[in-house]
Image: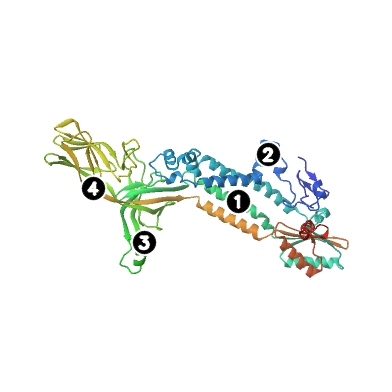
């Protein structure tokens, strides 16, 4: 589109309302208005100029403030709905999410799961909202900040008469000594820390232009912050997992692709001394012993390679540490925090096969509750086969035996016992905690509980967050922009001589009272009259038409 040439000789982009150089109104609407629109210095914004290609339409859509606010509202609503029920990461890992939400919360839970709110922050449509918000911030900022910067950089000292007349604060004065008044004005405004420029007897005093960039610095901070949020869903950027490790065992650390392993050498819990006079009153109020600290003596290993499938990796010790609350084990951008524990978890259960009639013990088997064998040979034709194993036994809705989880909190077995008397079909027995029942009639043999070994288990939270620098930088930049745009205002004072007259005009993007105070101080120092505030005069006229106050009838 052709550029618009102003009478001052400056070529302005199509759609410009006020000349970027002299400020002359170029639009008929601005020429006839009592005050010009100074929101973006009257510059041409792409979104208000071009609307032909698909790129223009996309640009115009995302540059709209209404669209940006709409995306923010939708994001806030979605985030609020996502807190109604627990996210999938907080429900038991051994249950079906669809069944869990329906069973726990009914039809509302079913709808919640179907719409994807159970995994809200990882869903594609929530990520699309975040991406849309980021695109809106980028396009809206570029659409405004580039032409605004160009207009402020190109502004002349001598502004057009029509520009000065249509400022909110404007006045004409006839001082006795115009030249001296201009010099006094220049000295005083410089003293007030205005940056004063002079051209052909005209002055432009400008202060705090940097405040105009506050909102755009806000946008930069938000964009960086949103980038950090999105990066959390990229592999290797963010890890927040939980690993349970039993005493004497070694587990692969989640999020490390089986490169690092952690061994729980020992776990212990210390309680506050009930005889200590310092803590005795608090312990009595708490109703019993309280944990003072719990600690995992851990060893970190690094795998020297994946090795052959099915073989144990070769591990090299990296470091050992005492993991406590607020004292994590740190390595390679990871940190292991003490999160939870479980004391005396069932580990190995011992049972014996006995002759019911004579009470003779045929043999004893030791069952690893986390890795039970399928068959145990007792010799002399006696053997025990585990037909079914239920680590955390319960009866389901159909009355059939099932398990709640893989953790052996309530182990139960269906054994098939083979003996010389029953070499082929065997005898079936159901054995659980305080349960020992024959499955089919009376058996000649039975399984009896002999003992159990337990282990303490520690729960460690695995944390890795490479997005934290983005979040901190984005938040800090946002606060800088917020302070910059809130506590300072961009003030400008124009002064131009026309013979014996001096025209003064002023504008600020906010805090008009501060600009008026500067004009009052300038008036006391130089004798120039305080320019009239057209906005305040208009408001007064609307309140008191014909000089009367409607509030008095």
x and y, in percent, of residue 238 in the image: 47, 47
Kindly report the distance in space between the C-alpha atoms of the residues bearing marks 4 and 2.
Answer: 74 Å
Q: What residue sits right under mark 1 in the picture?
A: 220
Q: Are marks 4 and 2 in contact (CB under 8 Å)?
A: no
Q: Secondary structure at mark 1?
A: helix
The disc, 3 or 2, on the residue closer to the chain's N-terminal end is: 2
Q: What residue sits right under mark 3 in the picture?
A: 286
Label placed on residue 452: 4
Q: Are marks 3 and 1 in contact (CB under 8 Å)?
A: no
Quadrant location of the C terminus? Answer: bottom right
The disc, 1 or 4, on the residue closer to the chain's N-terminal end is: 1
Q: Is residue 296 visible?
A: yes
**Up/down of 474 relative to 442, above or below:** below
- Crowding at dot 3, Cα within 10 Å, few <14 / some 14-19 / many 20+, comes out as few
Kindly report the distance in space between the C-alpha atoms of the residues bearing marks 3 and 2.
Answer: 67 Å
Colour scheme in use: rainbow
Kindly report the distance in space between the C-alpha atoms of the residues bearing marks 3 and 1.
Answer: 50 Å
Q: Is residue 230 visible?
A: no
Label placed on residue 56: 2
Quadrant location of the N terminus? Answer: top right
Kindly report the distance in space between the C-alpha atoms of the residues bearing marks 2 and 1.
Answer: 23 Å
> Which marked residue is nearer to the observer: mark 3 or mark 2?
3
Q: Secondary structure at mark 4?
A: strand
Q: Secondary structure at mark 3?
A: helix
Q: Secondary structure at mark 2?
A: helix
The disc, 2 or 1, on the residue closer to the chain's N-terminal end is: 2
> Which marked residue is nearer to the observer: mark 4 or mark 2?
4
Farthest-out residue, front: 553
- Towards the viewer: 88 or 209: 88
x and y, in percent, of residue 528 in the image: 81, 66
- Crowding at dot 1, Cα within 10 Å, few <14 / some 14-19 / many 20+, comes out as many
Kindly report the distance in space between the C-alpha atoms of the residues bearing marks 4 and 3.
Answer: 32 Å
């Amino acid at each position: 589109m052709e550029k618009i040439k102003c009478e001052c000789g400056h070529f302005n982009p199509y759609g410009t309302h006020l000349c970027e150089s002299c400020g002359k109104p170029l639009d008929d609407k601005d020429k006839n208005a009592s005050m010009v629109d100074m929101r973006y210095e009257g510059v041409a914004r792409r979104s208000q100029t071009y609307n032909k290609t698909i790129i223009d339409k996309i640009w115009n859509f995302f540059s709209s403030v209404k669209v940006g606010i709409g995306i923010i509202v939708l994001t806030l609503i979605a985030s609020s709905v996502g807190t109604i029920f627990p996210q999938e990461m907080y429900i038991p890992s051994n249950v079906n999410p669809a069944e869990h939400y329906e069973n726990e919360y009914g039809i509302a839970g079913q709808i919640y799961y179907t719409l994807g709110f159970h995994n809200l922050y990882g869903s594609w449509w929530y990520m699309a909202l975040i991406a849309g918000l980021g695109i809106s911030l980028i396009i809206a900022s570029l659409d405004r900040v580039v032409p605004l910067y160009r207009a402020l950089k190109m502004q002349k000292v001598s502004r057009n008469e029509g520009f000065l007349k249509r400022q909110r604060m404007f006045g004409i004065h006839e001082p006795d000594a115009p030249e001296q008044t201009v010099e006094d004005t220049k000295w005083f405004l410089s003293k007030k820390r205005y940056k004063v420029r002079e051209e052909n007897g005209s002055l432009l005093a400008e202060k705090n232009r940097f405040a105009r960039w506050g909102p755009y610095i806000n946008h930069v901070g938000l964009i960086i912050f949103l980038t950090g949020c999105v990066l959390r869903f990229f592999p290797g950027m963010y890890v927040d997992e939980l690993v349970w490790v039993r005493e004497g065992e070694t587990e692969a650390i989640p999020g490390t692709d089986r490169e690092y392993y952690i061994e729980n050498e020992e776990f212990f819990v210390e309680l506050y001394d009930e005889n200590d006079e310092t803590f005795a009153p608090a312990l009595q109020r708490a109703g019993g012993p309280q944990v003072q600290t719990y600690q995992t003596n851990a060893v970190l290993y690094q795998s020297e390679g994946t090795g052959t499938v099915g073989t144990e990796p070769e591990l090299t010790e990296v470091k050992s540490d005492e993991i406590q609350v607020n004292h994590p084990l740190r390595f390679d951008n990871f940190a292991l925090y003490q999160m939870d524990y479980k004391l005396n978890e069932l580990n190995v259960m011992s049972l014996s096969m006995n002759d019911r009639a004579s009470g003779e013990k045929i043999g004893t088997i030791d069952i690893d509750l986390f890795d039970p064998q399928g068959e145990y040979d007792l010799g002399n034709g006696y053997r025990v086969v585990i037909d079914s194993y239920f680590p955390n036994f319960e009866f389901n809705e159909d009355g059939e035996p099932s398990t709640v989880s893989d953790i052996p909190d309530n182990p139960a077995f269906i054994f098939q016992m083979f003996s010389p008397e029953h070499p082929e079909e065997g005898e079936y027995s159901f054995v659980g905690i305080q349960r020992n029942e024959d499955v089919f009639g009376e058996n000649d043999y039975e399984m009896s509980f002999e003992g159990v070994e337990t282990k303490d288990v520690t729960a460690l939270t695995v944390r890795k967050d490479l997005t934290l620098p983005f979040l901190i930088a984005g938040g800090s930049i946002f606060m800088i922009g917020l302070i910059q745009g809130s506590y300072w205002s961009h003030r400008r004072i124009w002064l131009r001589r026309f013979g014996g007259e001096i025209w003064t005009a002023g504008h600020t993007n906010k805090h008009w009272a501060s600009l008026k105070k500067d004009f009052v101080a300038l008036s006391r120092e130089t004798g120039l009259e305080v320019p009239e505030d057209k906005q305040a005069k208009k408001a007064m006229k609307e309140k008191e038409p014909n000089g009367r106050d409607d509030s008095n009838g």
